Amino acid sequence: MGTVADTPVPVDFEKRVRSQIEDVPAFLRSLESSAPVSIRYNKAKRKNFTGSLFQGSEIPWCAEGVMLPERPAFGKDILYHAGLYYPMEPSSMFLAFVLGQIQLPAQSILLDLCAAPGGKTLILNDFFPDSLLISNELNPTRVQALRENSIRWGTRNHVLLNGSIEQILASGLQVQLLLVDAPCSGEGLFRKDKESRKEWTPERAAGCAVRQSQILEAAAKMIAPGGYLVYSTCTYNPDENGKQLESLLDTCQFESVRLGVPAEWNVEEIASKQVSCYQFWPHRLTGEGFFISVLRDKRESNNDGLWEFPETDLPKTKKNLPPAELCHEKIILQRESGFSGFTPDEWNAFSHLKKRCRVVTSGTELGSFKGTDFIPSHQLAMRPNSAIDLPRKEIDFDQATHYLRGNALNIQGEPKGPVLLIHQGLAIGWGKSNGARINNLIPKAVRLKN
């Protein structure tokens, strides 16, 4: 199959980089070295975790980030399936530092426009838990990965869309923060992905720049007065990075936000006309190629918080609701697949946006009735700190592994009915006790890989 090093760096790429930096030999050598491995902890779930954390070095710009000495088998790790952490490239975690310098009104609306597979969406949700987060992904395959990662993490106040930018724009949505992690030529992946080297051409990079301009033109129209645009890529190409933002400053609607980045982090600050840009180079720090910049809408804010959607009638259910202990402060909607619970913000957004876009996930799936028995959903189990007044059972490593592979547990004496199974303080899913054993309720799609 060959390695990344077996595929040479494109000649035209190297030629352009020589016009950007002086230490090109060191940069090229870094592309032949092993890519770093890192994770970002789920802060909410970490508080409940009773086991041993990974040993590794800190990532200076992300308090929850850890650099690991080697790559674990994430797909086989119980703690990954429990949502304790998310594998994420270290440079991309710089978004956490950026968000720490942005102040938003309480209960703002956030939009992650190109969100899959979801690492940056999870950071947004963690930093602004009281705001409504809308995450969109155009690709129908990639949006499923976004959905799975969001459920595993236990996001709240969150709506997932599978729509085009034009559809979202037509909804009239206005947001206080919009993240565009733009589709790009992928030069920042050259160290770990040989296909990105094979696919790169100057023409493809130019085509990406055209598409990015179209995305930003639409995105600018969705930002509320006083709101922020965060733009990022995984490329080194100035045409896809800083130059994309220059035209927005020319409209006089936006101003560049300069970040106070410590010099010892070795993040390059680039001034593209009047835009402050931040470029990561893998030979100067531990991370891949990453670019980010922040613009602020200069218009005076006319809204202290959440933009209100048109009023929507509350849903009516046709049969008994799920048990009350699952529905604290939730609007309940009955669907063919079962019941879903919404915060008021989630319900208003869902009701409005479904007219224009395909809504993939909205609210929390609560579960469904089988006969007279209510079977709670896996998404409900994954929510950290949720007030679920149902029996819980702590299980050991072998039991948790056996369960996550789809098997029943020979545990006797538990009350009959749903049981939330816990491993090292973390919920991993539901079982149903019959008094003699606990039958498995975990969905096939999220079972542990053998």
Image (cartoon, rainbow, N blue to C red):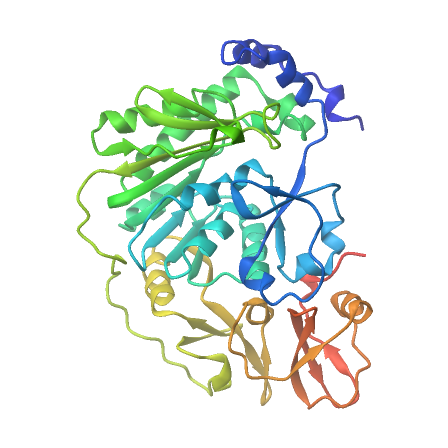
Please give the name of the residue rendered at 74% of the width and 79% of the height, measured from the top-left corner.
439
Q: Nearer the viewer, residue 236 or 115?
A: 236
Q: Is 146 positioned to the left or the right of 222 in the image?
A: right
Q: Do we see residue 114 in this rendering?
A: no
Quadrant hosting residue 352 = bottom left
Q: Is 225 positioned to the left or the right of 369 in the image?
A: left
Q: Is residue 411 above or below residue 295?
A: below
Please give the name of the residue rendered at 42% of the width and 84% of the height, measured from the top-left corner.
318
Q: Nearer the viewer, residue 139 or 222?
A: 222
Quadrant hosting residue 108 = bottom left
Percent x, y of residue 149: 58, 54
Quadrant of the frame with the C terminus: bottom right
Q: Do we see residue 89 in this rendering?
A: yes
Q: Nearer the viewer, residue 421 or 436?
A: 421
Count of numbered tags: 0
Percent x, y of residue 300: 17, 44
Please give the name of the residue rendered at 32% of the width and 60% of the height, measured from the top-left corner.
107
Q: Is residue 281 above or below residue 391?
A: above
Q: Is residue 307 above or below residue 330?
A: above
Q: Is 98 positioned to the left or the right of 52 in the image?
A: left
Please give the name of the residue rendered at 33% of the width and 39% of the height, measured from the top-left corner.
219
Quadrant of the frame with the N terminus: top right
Percent x, y of residue 16: 52, 11
Percent x, y of residue 141: 57, 47
